[in-house]
Image (cartoon, helix red, strand yellow):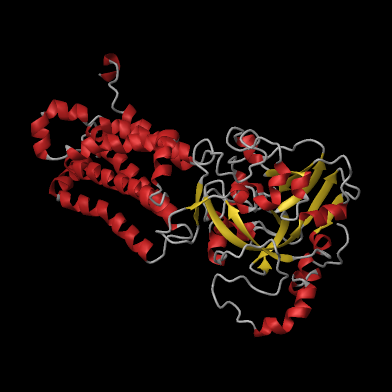
């Protein structure tokens, strides 16, 4: 056991530090005056706002925390909310390895130390053609990668979720080939939209949403946004990714949201917004989930029907 | 022992009005409407409605296909088969309606594209279409008009509906969860039980 004098990361990083200090100081007065939670769907204030946030109304906390695909806790969307309380998220460390200058096991407290936490309200589009709007709390993945020092030869980033079958009942079955694996091209990983999220609605990340730290890549289908990360590895070859291993014809490495490229079994042209009401119908799915202005250039010259 | 139990069940079944089975099969629908209206179906009520209607339809269809194999054990529940079959059709028709109106939001162009491009939608439609002639000929008058033999062969379409319905469920999900496979197994079982065993094994 390294460091920590019996301290846990949550002790080292009490909630106020979670929030952006600058914003806290500047906004303390305004915060007190603000009508907190005037609407149930309103994101909490107190964190730095981001120009990358959508102004669409976020889903409720209840919707975000009871409708989850997190197969480590079961296949039903209600299973994670039921089973994820078993998960121990403290202590937590992330192994950063591969083509980095400073590899090693990073305690979550070290990772959060000086991390520029912000609120990022992102659209979230599942490959199953439903969507939400989620007020994440997080910081740019680039911040952590720079901290570890990316070496020139690195081209990809590979992520892995915790494997702990005794706390993750879904891992006692072979529903997927554990550990859950995901990956990004380095330029995708370094993009300012790509964040590591440690909370939502101004609170620490609920276990069922991928506590204590997860990836969020808002222009890709939700399964790319890997949860409960314990390993980040910089590589020069394209890493294996879980759903691609499961069914390469249906799930590509890129998995960018693309209304023109159907899933082999269903259309991706439109989506249902969770929480919109029984008779709300559908809305058109946007290219790159509406983040095309920021990310389309990453894929210039690529045939996205082949590199789907 | 078993034989007397079967006799007792047969006796009870003779006295039970078929209306009870019709009503019992309709109760889940009433519950679903109430649960939807009072916001008890979770974060995604549309998916919950769609899934429940489809599941109940498939369950009733499988139940209706159990009647014949059960007769081999001496259990005679034939009087209830019409209620099970017609209510299966009702739930499948509602399942389709929920898909068109609630899930697809009446986006006709997308619906039509799905109908010829998506195998699981096509299978679902095959199942629904196979059940329409069955529902239409579910009356005593229709049986008389068609004659028992023709009616029986027409109603083998129920096998088509069950197979299509089970496959529809298996291929619409991500990965290979157990539940759809169990339904597929149940459909396979009730159909296999209908196969005539070779003469020498039957004695």
Query: Which of these two is toward me, A36 or B144?
Result: A36
Q: Is residue A137 left or right of residue B17?
A: right
Relative depth, front residue between A223 and A152: A152
* Residue ID at (55%, 41%): A260
Question: Residue A84, image x and y in percent?
Answer: 61, 57
- Would residue B77 be seen by someone viewing this image from the given angle? no
Q: Position of residue A142 (x, y in %)?
A: 80, 54
Rendering quarter of residue A192: bottom right
Front residue (pair A131, B149): A131
**Residue A256 appears anywhere in the view:** yes
Q: Quadrant of residue A180?
A: top right
Q: Residue at left 28%, top 27%?
A: B194
Q: Residue furthest right?
A: A101
Q: Is residue A182 above or below residue A49?
A: above
Q: Residue furthest top?
A: B200
Name the one closer to the observer, A296 or B182.
A296
Q: In the rendered view, does B139 fall on the left or right side of B130?
A: left
Q: Is residue A57 left or right of residue B135?
A: right
* Residue B46 relative to residue A71: left or right: left
Residue ID at (73%, 57%): A196
Quarter the C terminus of chain A occupies: top right
> Is the N terminus of chain A in the top left, top right, bottom left or bottom right quadrant?
bottom right
Count of numbered tags: 0
**Residue positioned 71% across, 37% down in the render:** A301
Horizontal and vertical percent position of residue A267: 50, 41
């Amino acid at each position: 056991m390294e460091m920590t004098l019996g301290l846990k990361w949550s002790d080292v990083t009490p909630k106020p530090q979670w929030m952006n200090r600058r914003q806290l100081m500047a906004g303390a007065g305004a915060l007190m005056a603000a009508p907190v939670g005037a609407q149930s769907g309103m994101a909490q204030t107190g964190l730095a706002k981001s120009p990358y946030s959508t102004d669409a109304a976020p889903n409720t906390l209840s919707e975000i925390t009871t409708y989850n695909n997190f197969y480590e806790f079961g296949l039903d969307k209600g299973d994670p909310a039921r089973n994820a309380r078993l998960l121990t998220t403290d202590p937590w460390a992330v192994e950063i390895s591969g083509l980095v200058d400073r590899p090693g096991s990073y305690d979550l407290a070290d990772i959060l130390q000086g991390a520029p936490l912000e609120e990022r309200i992102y659209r979230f589009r599942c490959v199953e053609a439903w969507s939400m709007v989620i007020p994440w709390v997080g910081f740019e993945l680039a911040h952590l990668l720079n901290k570890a020092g990316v070496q020139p030869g690195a081209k990809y980033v590979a992520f892995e979720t915790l494997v702990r079958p005794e706390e993750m009942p879904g891992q006692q079955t072979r529903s997927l080939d554990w550990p859950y694996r995901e990956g990004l091209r380095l330029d995708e990983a370094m993009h300012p939209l790509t964040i590591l999220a440690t909370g939502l609605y101004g609170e620490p990340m609920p276990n069922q949403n991928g506590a204590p730290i997860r990836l969020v890549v808002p222009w890709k289908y939700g399964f790319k946004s890997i949860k409960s990360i314990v390993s980040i590895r910089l590589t020069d070859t394209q890493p294996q990714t879980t759903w691609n291993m499961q069914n390469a014809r249906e799930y590509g490495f890129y998995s960018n949201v693309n209304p023109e490229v159907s899933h082999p079994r269903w259309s991706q042209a439109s989506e249902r917004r969770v929480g919109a009401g029984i008779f709300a119908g559908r809305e058109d799915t946007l290219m790159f989930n509406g983040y095309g202005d920021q990310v389309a250039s990453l894929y210039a010259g690529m045939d996205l029907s082949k590199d789907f | 022992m078993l034989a007397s139990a079967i006799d007792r069940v047969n006796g009870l079944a003779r006295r039970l009005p078929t209306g009870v089975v019709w009503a019992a099969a309709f109760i889940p629908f009433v519950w679903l409407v109430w649960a939807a209206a009072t916001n008890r179906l979770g974060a995604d009520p549309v998916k919950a409605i769609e899934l429940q209607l489809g599941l109940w339809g498939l369950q009733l269809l499988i139940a209706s296909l159990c009647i014949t194999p059960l007769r081999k054990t001496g259990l005679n529940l034939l009087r209830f088969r019409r209620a099970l079959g017609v209510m299966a059709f009702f739930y499948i028709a509602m399942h389709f309606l929920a898909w068109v109106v609630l899930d697809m939001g009446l986006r006709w162009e997308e619906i039509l594209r799905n109908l010829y491009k998506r195998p699981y939608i096509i299978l679902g439609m095959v199942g629904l279409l196979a059940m329409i002639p069955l529902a239409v000929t579910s009356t005593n008058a229709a049986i008389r008009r068609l004659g028992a033999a023709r009616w029986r062969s027409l109603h083998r379409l129920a096998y088509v509906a069950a197979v299509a319905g089970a496959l529809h469920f298996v291929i619409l999900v991500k990965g290979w969860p157990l539940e759809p496979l169990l339904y597929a197994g149940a459909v396979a079982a009730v159909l296999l039980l209908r196969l005539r065993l070779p003469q020498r094994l039957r004695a």
